[in-house]
Amino acid sequence: MIGMKDGGAQKVTIRLDRGTIRKARILAARRGTSISGLVARQIESLVGVEVSDECYERAMRQALALMKQGFHLGGGGLRDRDGVHERG
């Protein structure tokens, strides 16, 4: 995109109360990052979880479809009770 810096990153403005900002500054300092870094990591994590959930749901649908279809495992037909217990 034209006019974007930082590899396509875009600025976002949010509003927080002063107490939350103060706590976020302390947390960011402890983690060696900025408030912006904290927020970016959390949002990226949330988006990643959503993508993982979508992948899980798709895999689940595929697995259920395969189970419904069934698999031929090479065996013959089932024998009745008398045939199983026949002595030869």
Image (spheres, rainbow, N blue to C red):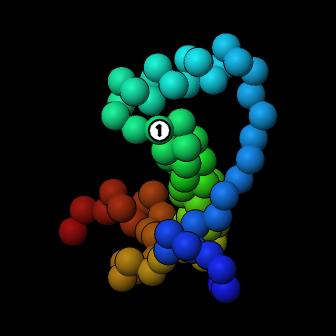
Q: Which image quadrant: the N terminus?
A: bottom right
Q: Left or right? Give the position of 87 relative to 66.
A: left
User: Which residue is painted at 44% across and 69% down in the image?
Assistant: 79
Write down the residue under mark 1. Answer: 34
User: Which residue is painted at 66% across and 80% down in the image?
Assistant: 3
The image shows residue 47, relative to residue 23, as above or below, that is below
The image shows residue 78, relative to residue 24, as above or below, that is below
User: Which residue is painted at 47% across and 38% down in the image?
Assistant: 34
Residue 9 horizontal/vertical position (percent): 58, 66
Q: Residue furthest top?
A: 19
Q: Residue furthest bottom?
A: 2
In depth, the one of 5 and 86 nearer the eye is: 5
Residue 50 horizontal/vertical position (percent): 62, 54
Q: Is residue 49 something one can see in this rendering?
A: no
Residue 16 horizontal/vertical position (percent): 74, 28
Residue 20, image quadrant:
top right
Q: Is residue 87 something one can see in this rendering?
A: yes
Q: Left or right? Give the position of 57 relative to 16.
A: left
In depth, the one of 75 and 59 nearer the eye is: 59
Q: Amino acid at mark 1?
A: Ser
Residue 41 horizontal/vertical position (percent): 50, 46
State the SS at label 1. Answer: loop
Q: Residue furthest left?
A: 88
